[in-house]
Amino acid sequence: MRRLLAKAAVTNAAVLVLASSTVSTSALAQDKPSWVYGYGTESCMEFSRRTSDPEGRMMELNWVLGYLSAVGQFVPLKKTDRPAIERGVVGYCKNHPTDTLRHAAQAVGMFLMKQAAASDSSEDSSDTPPPKQGTVRAPKAKGY
């Protein structure tokens, strides 16, 4: 019971961290500078157009990996691999072309956080399938 309560507390904290970054960004988006730097400000439409530019796509995905690595320092994320993260981002961007790459990274992060919370053991993730294209959704913030 104690373990279940601890896991629920961590999950709630993670949701607050990811959701608060969305809410705070929407508040800043009204003619004020944003705290998101680099490729995270790029639209999903721009990301999707870069399929013919492997170097550009690699840099964008590295931004997402860095974002998820930073989030993973504060909340547990289900262990996965780069191709699975890329599929999640591609699927999200396909369904939300006007959102930013940060929104796609948040959606993948939320998916991985929920998977970690649902798993009894974060050590063995080899049996967890990667997210399918279009299965992750980022929370919508007011003002977007």
Image (cartoon, rainbow, N blue to C red):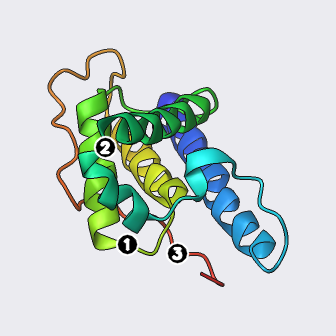
Which residue sits at x=18%, y=20%? Answer: 126
When the figure is inspected, residue 1 is found, relative to residue 123, above or below; the finding is below
Residue 47 relative to residue 4: left or right: left
Marks 2/3: CA distance? 29 Å
Residue 50 on image: x %, y %? 33, 52
Return the residue at label 2: 53
Q: Which of marks 1 and 2 is in front?
A: 2
Comes first in the chain, label 1 or label 2: 2
Front in this rendered view, residue 7 or 135: 135
Q: Find residue 97 and name its label.
A: 1
Q: What amino acid is at disc 1? A: Pro
Kindly give the residue lying farthest to the top in the view shown.
123
Q: Which residue is drawn at 69% across and 60% down?
A: 20
Q: Is mark 1 on a helix, strand or loop?
A: loop
| Labels 1 and 3: the sequence-earlier one | 1
| Residue at point 30%, 37% (across, down) | 54
In this orientation, which residue lies closer to the viewer: 142 or 51? 51
How far apart marks 1 and 2 lie (CA) works out to: 18 Å
Question: In this view of the protein, which residue sits in the foreground, 2 or 120?
Answer: 120
Secondary element under disc 3, as helix, strand or loop, is loop
Q: Name the residue under label 3.
A: 140
Q: Distance between the residues labelled 1 and 3?
A: 14 Å
- In the image as oriented, which residue stretches furthest toward the right? 32
Residue 118, above or below 100: above
